[in-house]
Amino acid sequence: MAGGPVTGVVHQPGSAAEVAEAVRGAELVVPRGGGTKPPLAVVDGAEVLDVSALSGITEYLPSEYTVTALAGTPLAEVEARLAAEGQYLPFDPLLVDAGSTVGGTVAAGANGPGRLRYGGLRDFLLAVAFVDGRGEIVRGGAKVVKNAAGFDLPKLMVGSLGRLGVLTECTFKVFPHPESCATVRVAGMAFDEALEAAGRVGSGAVELECLDLVHGLAGWDLEIRIGGRSFALDARLKRAADLLDTDVTTLSGDADATHWRSRREFGWAPPDASVLKLPLTPATAAVLEQVLADLDASHVARVYSAGVQQAFVAWPVERAADMPSLDRALAQSKLTALALRAPADASNQPILGYRTGGELLRRVEQALDPAGRFGRLG
């Protein structure tokens, strides 16, 4: 991942040792993987570490439900290998078809709508190897599911944006893939109505794979995905429809799979828009709606995803000059946004709104990168 001006120097290390050597020889460096989330590692004047050569699955133990891959490995390769054994990454990584990589996904800390049922990336990352700011190779965690020893470095690297170290290898816990999935949808609801219906279904006796609210021309669409054994799927879909107590449409088979794949590839967003991700709760979703209304931006495309635990907002390219106003409004409302995508000529500011971390973040940065070779998050 990279964005913003760079020095023109690009390193293409083929091993963790070469990554360490490149870090030791640079004053300022930024890692780049598949380049699917350009604004996330913006370090002006930095040399680029292209880790795409660090690619390949180094260990896969289907019976142990773990997979280990080098940081530059395309997630599409990991998903294909897991699918052959009927397994998957339950945190539902974003932009897989676009070329996102293992390391970039961890550094971004971003999940798709399927994180609703089992949790996010932090819950499935077991171990990491990375190069710190001293140019030393560091390992944390363990390649086993039951592990409680030592400092939890893997979770520290989730969402680090490449500013605490250059990831070289990651180990994930995986799960069996649902045998079949289908989606029920209610279209054209008011926002409060959609929130209330989402809460009703979410607290009902139906296990959900995904629950998203999608802003459309006719109002809000509530989309609920259910997975499981094929013989039980129709009954579970009916229970969800009964809880909604209104007319629904259903997607199944290839239509269902294609729909949710497009969702995590940002197929709902205009291609030239900046895509922002915000952590939320159902209560703070209303706060975000007010922020957008105050900025005369209630029309922008957006999705409240994973049971309204996160929002994705497509900020229009024609409103790029208003991004500072959005930044201030989010900060005043104690909301934080991460820019996952932005136009090439945008400022590429990766974090907007309320900043968190403070002194603790500065101490972590000082410990792992005392010379500031990766820039600073704070």
Image (cartoon, helix red, strand yellow):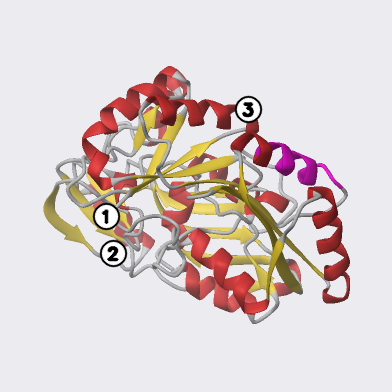
Q: Which mark is residue 13?
A: 2
Q: From the top left corner, tell me how far across and down residue 378 is, in percent.
A: 35, 26
Instruction: Specify the segment rendered in magenta.
Output: 195-204
Q: Dot 3, crowdedness within 10 Å: few (<14), some or many (≥20)? A: few
Q: Which mark is residue 21?
A: 1
Left or right: 83 as drawn, with respect to 295 = right
Position of residue 278 relative to residue 250, above or below, is: above
Q: Which residue is mark 3?
A: 283
Q: Nearer the viewer, mark 1 or mark 2?
A: 2
Q: Main secondary structure of the magenta part?
A: helix
Left or right: 137 as drawn, with respect to 321 = right
Mark 3 and mark 2: Cα distance apart in space: 46 Å
Position of residue 357 relative to residue 168, above or below, is: above
Mark 1 and mark 2: Cα distance apart in space: 9 Å
Position of residue 358 relative to residue 118, above or below, is: above
On the question of residue 371 being in view, the answer is no
Q: From the top left corner, tell me how far across and down residue 158 is, in percent.
A: 50, 44
Q: Nearer the viewer, mark 3 or mark 2?
A: 3
Question: Disc 3 vs disc 1: Cβ atoms closer than 8 Å?
Answer: no
Residue at image position (27%, 48%) is 30
The number of numbered badges drawn on the structure is 3
Q: Secondary structure at mark 1?
A: helix
On the question of residue 192 being in view, the answer is yes
Question: Disc 1 vs disc 2: Cβ atoms closer than 8 Å?
Answer: yes
Farthest-out residue, bottom: 84
Q: Earlier in the sequence, mark 3 or mark 2?
A: 2
Position of residue 353 relative to residue 55, above or below, is: above
Residue 127 on the magenta segment: no
Q: Amino acid at mark 3?
A: Ala
Q: Secondary structure at mark 3?
A: helix
Relative to the observer, which residue lies in front, 347 or 91? Answer: 347
